[in-house]
Amino acid sequence: MQSHYDAELKDTVRYLGTVLGQTIKAQLGQEWLDRIETIRKDGRASYQGEGSATENLKETFKTLSDTDLLTVGRAFAQFLNLGNIAEQEYNSVMDVDASIDTLFEHVDKANLSAEKVQQAVSKLNIDMVLTAHPTEVTRRTLIHKHKELASCLQTVHQETLGDKERSRIETRIADLISQAWHTEEIRSVRPTPVDEARWGFSVIENSLWEAVPDFLRDLDERLELEYNVSLPIDASPVQFSSWMGGDRDGNPFVTAKVTEQVLLLARKRAAKLFAQDLDNLQVELSMFDCNEALRNVAGDSNEPYRAVLRPLHQRCIATRDGISDYLAGKNVNRSNWIEADEELLEPLTLCYNSLCDSGMKVTADGKLLDTIRRVHSFGVHLLRLDIRQDSERHSNVFSELTRYLGLGDYAQWNEADKQAFLLRELSSKRPLFPQNWGASEEVQEVLDTCKVIAQHRKDGFGIYIISMASEPSDVLAVQLLLQESGVNWPMPVAPLFETLDDLNNSPQVMQRLLSIDWYRGYVKGRQFVMIGYSDSAKDAGALAAGWAQYESQEALVKVASEFDVTLTLFHGRGGTIGRGGLPAHAAIYSQPPGSLEGGFRVTEQGETIRYKFGMPKLAKRSLGIYASAIIEAMLFPPPEPKQEWRELITKMAALGRDNYRQTVRNDRDFVPYFRVATPEQELGKLPLGSRPSKRKPSGGIESLRAIPWIFAWAQTRLVLPSWLGVMRAIDEVKASSDEKIVNEMFKDWPFYRSRLSMLDMVFHKADPRISEEYDARLVPEELKHFGEELRTELKTSVESLLQLTKQKTIMADDPKGKESMNIRAGYLQPLHFLQIELLDRIRKLQADAADTTLERAMMVTIAGIAIGMRNTG
């Protein structure tokens, strides 16, 4: 084993690969290790363009048995996992402070007063919404091993480490890699929504619990140093919400019972974590001196702080154990459970003020302040659960009800009649739902969900999101359902505007909604609106969707201002470009001016949660990036686009939409080509998340969720949805426009520049040579022209982008990102050729003659390529 560990990323990857090789050798022998090493070398040479190496890979895989293909697939998927761990650890070590530094590098400090900075910081509100869309391909048991491995890498990097200690850590690294190799990497069954929620809780416990107070401490210190501005102890600029166990849109497995279970499990985990904090505080706060307020509560105790904290600790234990008993079906006494944040904050703040008054502020600002900040960030519910449901499901409730009451069919009424009915019932003091109404199972599930909301405290919930919202009645319907179910607090209800048409119509919808007197009274000056990124891109292509998102946000900000309402825009971004994914700073700074005034709420989806927040140092870095970008955007808003910029981007977006739809919607060869050229059909067998891959099982491409849509194209490295039709549209407009204006857009408009930056990243991940290999083996002759045309457009688009950005090579401005992909490329190459071989074998079998070894190998390659691409959907 290599005795010296070099901190450079390449050496780290090489080191981990060597250890994995020794693990494989220990199980399978030297011959297997030699075979894998030969494949690895051919993979690297093939990536670099050596045709003979490519042919070697093809021939090698043709001659291997199904079982041997599985072994090779596992080896290279593990290589890529280890490469990602090395990169995460490397980034966390190198850049942990750089994120906060970014703010102080970018802003023009000379023109900033402490008052302006304080005002911006006071508005800082980052709400990270953890979601479990089926994008996390790595099992939780392996994630634990990977976290342990990253911790070992951090330790072994230390230059002061002695030889004996280094040897011990290296042995542990070999142990963890061996454990991972001998563990099934593919789940045998899909995770349940409760499994997904527990995974989210673990991210908080193992990473964010430590990272959030560390980040706030660093931010506080830097603000104090630079501007004499400090965060108050009750500041909560970072909060966490979740869709895990609450997102029932198209997921029949998320039921009212599941939602209640997840709410209780979150409280149980919070109680456990706060109990640990309080236990540590009891050990530390042994002092006698205190102020009069604390003495009045603690009595004559010689250890007044412990006297106050001890019963609080006992109540956390009672809450933790009581929830376990309740979920096990036992009768429990809830009287000693902690129900609200204030029950923690009041005694903790009492202790804090006493320490400060007694000359012990240095102690107050230690672990005690960390715990107070955790209460403000996480609370006794750990995170706030959003509820999401499709508007049609709400409409169905009222259709069934109005038919039962002899009022006709609600679904057939016009918008004016729906609003009149809903507003009349919202103002009525009598119950609407008859006691003996025998609602259908589907309708009853919607009602049961609303009852669960009514039975729990509002602090446990975030917002109620309505998918496919298109009219004010969609929002009013949910508010009536909540009211009739006994929800006696104004739960925020957010329409989700997803498709291109819905985005374009969203300002008019919100204008009509906020014009309703009853509604304005209900929202009390605060409105949430969710912007959908993935469905709009799937509907109209990346450029048209991006511009529609920008224009709708811009218009929604103006509508909110007109009605004196604080607007919080909720961004439903994914990890990939085709789902709105952008580097955080670029994503935030490219938004319309004024769109951050009501806070920043964004989904963190699937594997991006692990990549951004999976380790404390990474999480701290990610939070710093978000905070610095938001503060910068508030202090120095990006410019409003000039009229000539608007005109050009509008033309580009329209052409981009037409280009995209001409291929995806109008070409009859597209669907047949998509089915055979990508592993889209095989993806449905991969037990990724709890949600089905299609909204409607009988539907075609139009009902395919955006995630598998993106996932399928990423597997073949064509990454089609992220670029199709975009550069063609830009080139066409550019050719007939003033070059000076086009250049000015690129130089001075963050929104436009970020679109091109996204394409730069996409084109580096794309590889037309790989796509061509899939076509050569899997696509029938009469459809091959389709792939050739797409690859021709891809190559032309790359050339156009380089010309426009005046770069010689793709990602020339991001050498670190470029090198990151290059390191993984050699390991990815064999997996692609292996997947092609497996697809060919599987498709030649009869449907009823499925081979479990082949299918498992297929799943391994799908997961491995997703890991290597660093995103799935």
Image: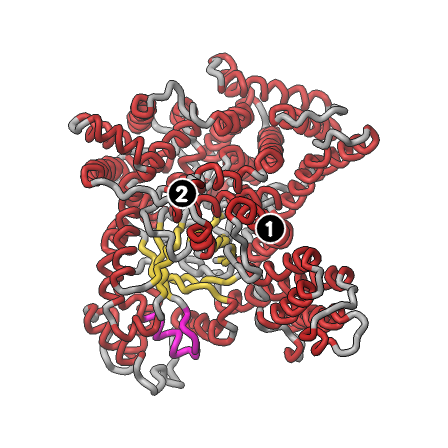
- Magenta part of the protein: which range? 477-491
Q: How is the image coloured?
A: secondary structure
Nearer to us in this view, 815 or 710: 815
Q: In this view, does 586 lie above or below 690?
A: above
The residue located at (83%, 31%) in the rendering is: 164
Residue 67 visible within the image: no
Contact, mark 2 vs mark 1 (Cβ under 8 Å) = no
- Which amino acid type is shown beneath numbered disc 2? Asn
Q: Residue at x 30, y 66 (%)?
A: 474
Percent of width and height locating residue 571: 39, 51
Precedes in sequence: disc 2 or disc 1: 2
Which residue does the image show at 59% across and 56% down from the upper left? Answer: 201
Please tell me whether mark 2 or mark 1 is closer to you in this view.
2
Instruction: Judge from the rendering whether residue 68 lies leftward or rightward of residue 418; answer left or right.
Output: right
Residue under numbered circle 2: 111
Specify the label residue 69 is tagged with: none
Mark 1 sits on what residue? 217
Q: Position of residue 392 (x, y in %)?
A: 32, 64
